[in-house]
Amino acid sequence: MKRIAVMTSGGDSSGLNAAIRAVVRTGMAHDVEVFGVRQGYTGLLNGDIKPLTSFEVSGILQRGGTILQTARNEEFKTPEGQKRGLRNLNTRGIEGVVVIGGDGSLRGALGLHRLGMPVIGIPGSIDNDIWGTDMSIGVDTALNTILDALDRIRDTATSHQRAFLIEVMGRNCGYLAVMAGILGGAEIVIAPEHAITMEQVAEALEDAYVRGKTHAVAVIAEGAPFKITDLANYLDSNKSVGFEIRLTILGHIQRGGSPTAFDRLLATRMGVSAVERLLKGESGVMVALQGRKMETIALEEVVTKTRLISDEYFEMERILSR
Ligand code: ADP
Ligand code: F6P
């Protein structure tokens, strides 16, 4: 293999640049030319594919976002789109691809692999919903950002004796919400994996008030069974809670920012491993952190299974919130 390509796709997360840098420099160390595909599958379809030099990846290790930019593209989900993407790689003599992204992006990677292009996936998503890896790139940074916000909000909650509802990202997976709840000392966590009613949330907040707490914090995942605004309205009209209610939606501040040491290391290890495996002839797999080891898992398995947060953490949060 003399030419490979790297791309970032789907939602960005901190540490993508560290992974791109690792891919480029590992390629160079093996005398392989590394091309960068701009804006995910959109760039692949438009032929926006250019060589990346060592100089271009210098000074990016500590930067959030992705120098290659990212995108979501409906056309690439079709067989015609995937064939055009493959053609654009073939006409440039590219013999292997590293795709960095979330669940959807890895489905696209599997599509290319099935068409015969050697592909290795790298999990990048703040949600930590990707099957087979303990952690995905960007999760740790997002969690630290959430904790920083939560600590600040708790100061105000205590000063004003308020209950704060804080929404964090996570459409299908409550990892960020549950971890933020445990590590930020929330009174209650509402996540997609666990059925809960607004009434139960009101009871938990009221219980904190009656026990004499000076504040209460409820962390709500984006994919919770009900919307944060509906919950705030419900609690506002339910005077028995005791606390005044405020809500904060953290939104996209969770996705950017300089990656933590953990994310830099994870991204670097994954980038190095992806290129080494591609050059050894592996394809159709995602590199995955399992315990302390960098292993691989078949993309077929990754995209057919959904990682949910384990009940053990829910239980831990419930016990510690008292
Ligand atoms: P993420 O990778 O962060 O989960 P998305 O789910 O939006 O983000 O997926 C990113 C992109 O991956 C999509 O816009 C599309 O181009 C591609 N993709 C998603 N699902 C598929 C699929 N089933 N087949 C091929 N490509 C896909
Ligand atoms: O998958 C990552 C994620 O940040 C989800 O947590 C969130 O639901 C979604 O992406 C938001 O996507 P967008 O950037 O398109 O608003």
Image (cartoon, helix red, strand yellow):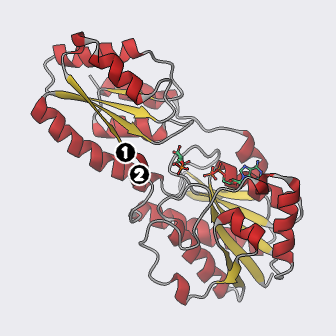
Residue 63 drawn above or below residue 10: below
Which quadrant of the view contains residue 245?
top left
Q: Residue at x 64, y 44 (%)?
A: 131
Circle 2 is placed at which residue position?
254
- Please name the amino acid that badge 1 sits on: Leu
- Residue 112 point in image, percent of width and height: 82, 61
Tag 2 near tag 1, CB within 8 Å: yes
Task: Answer whether residue 271 is visible to the viewer in this image.
Answer: yes
- Residue 162 point in image, percent of width and height: 18, 28
Q: Residue at x 82, y 56 (%)?
A: 111
Circle 1 is placed at which residue position?
250
Gap between marks 2 and 1 measured at Cα:
7 Å
Name the element at disc 1. Answer: loop
Residue 50 falls left or right of residue 225 = right
Residue 5 drawn above or below residue 123: below
**Ligand 2 within 8 Å of the CB at mark 1:** no
**Local crowd size for mark 2, using a 10 Å CA cut-off: few (<14), some (14–19), many (≥20):** many
Task: Answer whether residue 215 is visible to the viewer in this image.
Answer: no
- Please name the amino acid that badge 2 sits on: Gln
State the residue in front, 127 or 79. 79
**Ligand 2 within 8 Å of the CB at mark 2:** yes
**So how many labels did they put on this image?**
2
Question: Which image quarter is the N terminus in?
Answer: bottom right
Name the element at disc 2. Answer: helix
